[in-house]
Amino acid sequence: MTPTPGCSSCPFVQQLGIDLSEWDYLVALAGNPNTGKSTLFNRLTGLKQHVGNWPGKTVTRAEGGFEFNGKRYKLVDLPGTYSLLSASVEEEIARDFILFGNPDGVIVVMDATAVERNLNLTLQILEITDRVVVALNLMDEARRKGIHVNHRGLARELGVPVVPIVARTGEGIGYLMQALEDVIEGRVRTHPRRIPLDPALEHAVRELVPLIEQAFPGVRNARWIAIRLLDGDPTIERAVRTGELSALLTGELPRDALPVDETPQEEETLYPPGLAILKKADILRAALDEDFRDRLVEDIYNEAARITQRVVRVEGTPAQTWDERIDRIVTHPVWGLPLMLLGLALAFWVTVVGANYPSEWLATLLFGIEGLGARAFQALGLPWWVTGFLWHGVYRGLAWVVSVMLPPMAIFFPIFTLLEDLGYLPRVAFNLDWLFKKVGAHGKQALTMTMGFGCNAAGVIATRIIESPRERLIAILTNNFVPCNGRWPTLIMLGTVFVAAAFPPAFAAFAAAGSIVAAVLVGVLFTFIVSWLLSHTLLKGEASAFTLELPPYRRPDIVRILYTSLIDRTIFVLWRAVYMAAPAGGLIWILANVHVHGQSLVHWLAAFLDPFGRLLGLDGVILLSYIVALPANEIVVPTMIMAYSGASTVTEVENLAALKALLVGQAGWTLLTAVSLMLFAVLHNPCSTTILTIWKETGSKKWTLIGALLPLAIAFLVTFVVAQVWRLSGWVM
Amino acid sequence: MGAHVFIWLIVVLVLLWVGKHGWEEYRIRRRSTLEDAIKYLYDCEEHHRYGVPEALAGKLGLSTRATLRLLHRMAQRNLIRFCGNRVCLTPAGKALGLQLLRAHRLWERYLSDYTDVPLREIHRLADKREHTLTQEDLQTLEATLGHPRRDPHGDPIPRESGEWMAEVGVPLTDWPVGQPARVVHVEDEPEDLFAQALAEGLIPGADVVILESKPEGLHLKVDGNDVWIASILAAQVHVIAAPARVEETPPMSLADLTRGERARVIGISREIRGLLRRRLLDLGFTRGAIVQEVLESAFGRGDPRAYRVRGTLIALRREQAEHIYAEPLTDEGGDVTP
C-alpha cells in the first residue's frame, strides 16, 4: 500500500494531548510488550499525556486525547501483556479495563514480525469484546525481514478489521482511525473468532453459558466468563457471587466499585443464581482433567499457529541475521564484557562532563536570583531573618539541589532510555544474570542499579521491570547501595582532596578516580552481600519466576525519548527540590542562625553527636549534615562546610587548597575520616524521596522500614569496624 | 554525653516495640490455642474418636487447669458442648473446624505453588497462617490457585460449603495385584471396621501395593509395612493409581539443546507450578511449540540461554529450561514462524 502521510500532518487526526474534556468515545490500547504500542499512543495523542498509576497499583497508566472526524476520543494505554489469563497485576489491569471499563472500542496492536505470539492476546481479547480493531504495526520491519502478512486474510480469520500501520512514521494511521470509527459506530459489524476449546472444556463451557446468560441478562461475553470461572478468577467469582456482574459489565457500577483486596469487606449480599453458577462450575471443574489450564493456553496458541500458517508467508531465510549478529557481539565471551563496561563508562563520562557547564550556568543564574531577591527584601525593609530564612535558607537549598542535580539527570536518563529502547539493556541483564542468580536476584537488577547511579528513587521505580516478586523486592531494598547523583559530589570531593593528595602529582588523578571506583565497588559488593542475605533469610519464601525477553533491536524514537525522559524527570526533580530540599534549606538556616548561649544550634547539635560520630571514625558535624540532608544528599558537603566555617548559610569553598585547609586544619580530619566518610556516603540510608518511593512501590511499612534502616545499620557497622581496626592497628592517632 | 542519650533513646524504643509486639503476639497465641483445640476436636470427630479433655491437654501441651479454662471459653462461645465426659463440637464449632482445615490446606497449596518454601516447612507455616485468614481471603485464595482439589500432601481441600470433592476410587478388592495405589477414601461406617483400617495405617494418602490376593483376605504393603487384611475390610478402602513419584524423564529438555538446534515442546514438568508455570505457558512454551536455542550466556557458562519461541527471544535459566521437555526436530521441518 502507498504510505499515508505522517499523522501530525494528516488531515484527520488532531492530537489533543492532555485535553480530555468531553470525549465522545473511550478507547483502550492493548498489545504485547515491545510492539510499538506507546509509539502509536504518542502518534495519536501527541507527546503530552497524563501519566500516573492505575488506582492502587504500581503500574503506569497513560491517557491522552485525539480528535478524528469531529469526534473526540479518550485513549487509555493498557499495560503491555502477553496474555490475560495469569494473575499478574498488569494482566489483571488490562483485563479489568477491557471488561469493566466499558471502552467503546479496543485497538489491539500486533507486531507484524511475530504474528503468532501476538495472536495469543488478540484471540483472548476477542473473547471479551467484539469492538476491536487490530493495528498490525511494524510493517516496515516485517517487509525488511521478508515477512508477508496477508492482512485481509487475517481480518477474515479474526472477524475484525485489521489495518497495517507503521506507527513510527504514521503510515496507515488514517485508515486505522477510520476502521475504529466504523466499528464503534456500528457501520462495520464484527464477528470475532472464538477460540476452539478441547472437547471436555468446551462441554463444560456450554453447560455454564446458559446459566450465566439467565442469571445476568444482557451479558455478551458469557462464554469467556464461563472459561474464567472454570479456570479460577477471584474478581469474576466475586462479581458472580454478589450479583454485581451485570452492573459492572454495563458500566452502571463504576469500575472503582470493584472490591479491592486491601479494603475491609463489608457484609456481602449474596446473589442466589450466582451461587448456583459457582456451584455448577465447581462440579464441572471436578470432571475436567487436572491440567486443563495447560490445555487452554495450548488451544489458544494452536489456533494462533493455524491462523499464522494461513496468513503469514516468509520469504527466503528468516532474516533475523542482523539481530543475531549483534547479539553474538554483545554477548561475546571476550567482547561482551568490555563493550558493556565501555558503554557504561561512556554514559557516565558524558553525564559528568556534559553536566559541568549547565550546572555552573544554573548555579550562577539561581544564586544570582538569590542575591537580587535578598536585596529586594532588604530594600522593602523586611527583618533580616525573613530575608535570611526565605532566600538564604529555603531558596538556597532549592537552588543548590536543582543546579547540582538537574543537569546530570537530564543527560543520564535520556541515554539510559535510549539504550533501553535500542534493546541493548536486556542483553546486559542477560550477560550479568549468572552473577545475580548466585545471590538469588534477577539479571534485570543490573539495569535498576544502573538507573540508581542517576537517582535511587528512579532506580526503585525502575524495578517494575522485574516481574518476579521476590527479585523485585531485593532490587528495591538494595538499590540504595549504588551511589546516586547526589552522592557523587561527596565522593569526588574526598577523592580529590584526600586520596589524590596522598600520592605524587603524577598519580593523583588516577588515585582520585581509583578511590571513587573503589567506593562504588564497595557499594556493589554490598548490593550482592545484602541481596544474598535477603534471599536466604527474610525473602526466602517469596515467589520467584525468572524469564527475560530479549526484544529485537529497534530504531529508537529519539524525539519521544528526549521529550519524555526530559520532561518526566525534570518535573520529578523540580517536585523533589520543592518538597524536600526547600524545607531542608530552611531548617539548615535556622540551625545555623539560632543561637543559644552564644553558639549556634549547629554547634550544639554537632557537639552532642560528636562522641557517637567519633566511634565511627566520623564526627558530629558529619552526622548532623547527614541528618539534615536526609531529603537531599546533594547538600551534605555544603552543610558540612557551613558548619565548620561557622558560616550562616550553606556554602562552598573557593578552591581545593582552602577546602583542605578547612577540613584538615580546622576540623581535624584525617585519612580515616575521609575513608569512613566515603564508606558512609555509599552505604548509609536512602534519602527521604527514595524511602517514600519504596513505600509507594511496596505498599508495606515493613519493607520500607527495612529499606531505610538496614543500610543505615550496615553503614554504622562497617564504619565502626573500620575505625576501630584502623585505630587499633595504630595507623592514625 | 551524646552517646548516653542515644543509647537510652534506643533502649526506650526497643522496649516500646517489644511491649506492643508482645501484646499482639499474646492475642494471636490465645486465639491460636483455641483454634488448635477446635481443629483437634474436629479431627477426632472426623475419625470417629471422641475428644476427651485429657487428650486435648496432651495434644496442646497445656496443664489441666489451663485446658479447663480453655474449654470453658469455648463453651461460652458456643463452639463446644459437653456430652458426658466427652467434648462435642456444636455446629458452629464444626464450621470453624472446617474453615481452619480449609485454610490450612489452601495455604499449603499456595506455599507449594507460589513460593519457594520447601515442602517440609509448609505444614508448620500453614499451622500459623491458618488462624489469620478470613472467609474472604479464602475465597480469593481458592480462585487464585485455580480451585485446587488437594493440598500438596494429597489431602482433599474441603469446599466452602463443607463438601469434599467426591473421590472417585476403586475398592481395594478390585485393584490389580502389584500395581501401586493410593488410598483416597475409607468408608467410615461401620465404625469398628473403620477403626481397624486406621489401625492398619489405611488412611487417605497412604500408598498401598497388593502383594497377594486370596479369597479370605489381602496381603498388602502399606507405606512400607506388611499388613494382612480381611476382604470385608478391603472393600471399605478406595484407591486410585498412585501418582508417579518420579516423573519419567523424557529424552531431553530445552536445556539440552545446542546453539541453533530446534525442538518441539512436549510439556512442562509438574515441578514447575503456580506463577512460573503460567508465565511459561503464556510466553508460548506450550505443547507442540517449536523452540530454537539461539544464545548462551558466555559468562554464566551457558546459563541463562535464550530461545526463540513463537517469534520472540526469551531467556530462561537452566533450572527452568531443564523442566521444559522437548523432542528433537529434524531440521527439514521449516515450520518456525518468525
Image (cartoon, coloured by chain):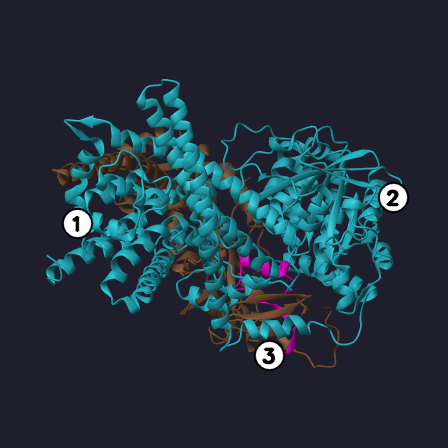
Chain colours: A cyan, B brown
Q: Chain of mark 3?
A: B
Q: Which residue is mark 2?
A: A189
Earlier in the chain: of badge 1 and badge 2, it is 2
- Can residue B265 be seen here? no
Of A463 and B272, the residue lying toward us: A463
Between marks 3 and 1 in the image, the one whose residue lies nearer the viewer: 1
Which quadrant of the figure has residue A384?
Answer: top left
Q: Give the image location of residue A586, x and y in percent.
A: 34, 30
Please identify the quadrant where the C terminus of chain B is shown.
bottom right
* Marks 3, 2: nearer the viewer: 3
- CA gap between label 1 and label 2 equals 84 Å
Q: Is residue B235 above or below residue A664?
A: below
Q: Amino acid at mark 3?
A: Arg
Q: Position of residue B229 (x, y in %)?
A: 45, 65
Along the line of sight, the residue nearer the viewer: A151 or A675: A675
Secondary structure found at label 2: loop
Cβ atoms under marks 1 and 2 closer than 8 Å: no
> Circle 1 — which element?
helix
Residue type (three-letter) at the residue carrying disc 2 = Arg
Asked if one can make out residue A62 in the rendered structure from this viewpoint, the answer is: yes
The residue segment tinted magenta is: B257-286
| Image quarter hosting the N terminus of chain B | top left
Residue ID for mark 1: A665
Q: Nearer the viewer, residue A469 or A434?
A: A434
Find residue B16 and name its label. Answer: none
The residue tagged 3 is B259
